[in-house]
Image (cartoon, rainbow, N blue to C red):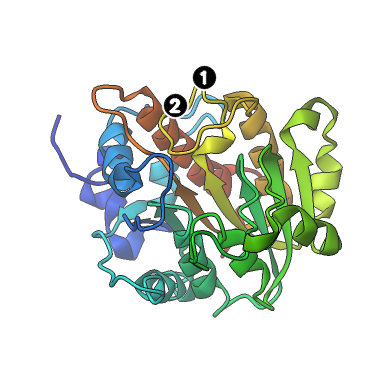
Amino acid sequence: MKQYNNFLNIPPEYSAFEKSKAVVIPFEYEASTTYGSGTKRGPEAIISASSQVELFDEELEKEAYKEAGVCTIPELKYKTGHDFYLPLADKTAEILALKKFPVILGGEHTITFGGIMGAKEKYKNFSVLHFDAHADLRDTYEDNKFSHACVMRRVSELKEVKNLVQVGIRNISNEKKEGSEFDFYKKNSDKIKIFWARDKEKWDMENILQGLKKDVYLTFDVDVFDPSIMPSTGTPEPGGLYWNEVLKILKQVFLKKNIIAADIVELCPIKDFSAPDFMIAKLIYKIIGYKFLLGKEKHV
């Protein structure tokens, strides 16, 4: 098999930037991981594993890469410090201005701030759909307001982000010195809606959809999956979601809403254990397929 060294290992006629509707952005930023590190290796592992993804989608009955075109751009460079997100924000804004669909590969969850800062250049009234085991609503963590544990707090402070829907949460803190996540959630329940993992058997899809504006930014932390199928993450939590449960939600959201951009974060590859990397590569291909093949195509 010829190696093209891009997401899905597809030839130029389907991966050229000019012809592609989906653009994969590798961003290996990692600075605040706590329990387990390695998210900076996530983009490379995902792209490598993607070469083994079957390109015909048995659910959609098509090859999404031929319908959409999928370009993978070079890894973005960044500087350390609180301005780390600027290259990603600029690139996301540029891709959206060209009416393409950005798919960002992290990296730690803090990169979501960069993706959303770019998205808000075009969209002024949108929701964030957040799959995660953790609420990530701390005001600060280890004296860092841009910790991965604070990213949804920073996102919620942006005026363009009208509301936040969190799915799969099963860890939220109440530490006052770092700005209690639980208190913040309770005080902002008009803007933040949590669908707790413990209640997943009772979730109403309509309630999830009703909490979202027409335009939605999707951020997906891989630790939303149960650690029995996703051990390759820095902060695993028991009681998570499974493959078909996640796809069921994503499918309905893509059918009913306009997903403007997506990021997938917090994969910490384990040496000589590639199954989780492959699962996330296939998830990303599903996201691209759902974006461009489900029902009437929605334009970004």
- The amino acid type, in three-letter code, at marker 1 is Ser
Q: Quadrant of the C terminus?
A: bottom right
SS at mark 2 in the image: loop
- The amino acid type, in three-letter code, at marker 2 is Pro
Q: Residue at x 62, y 44 (%)?
A: 134
Q: Residue 231, which numbered label? A: 2
Q: How crowded is the residue under tag 1: few (<14 C-alpha within 10 Å), some, or many (20+)?
A: some
Q: Residue at x 44, y 44 (%)?
A: 266
Q: Residue 79, which numbered label? A: none
How much space separates mark 2 and mark 1, taking CA atoms? Answer: 6 Å
Residue 22: quarter of image: bottom left
Mark 1 — residue?
228
Residue 256 in sight: yes
Place of residue 283 in the rendered image (x, y in percent of width and height, measured from the top left) = 48, 36
Residue located farthest toward the top when viewing the structure as drawn: 228
Q: Nearer the viewer, residue 221 or 188?
A: 188
Place of residue 23 in the rendered image (x, y in percent of width and height, measured from the top left) = 38, 58
Q: Nearer the viewer, residue 130 or 9?
A: 130
Q: Residue at x 30, y 49 (%)?
A: 40
Q: Quadrant of the N terminus?
A: top left
Image check: 71 left or right of 234? Answer: left
Q: Residue at x 62, y 33 (%)?
A: 247
Labels 2 and 1 touching (C-beta < 8 A): yes
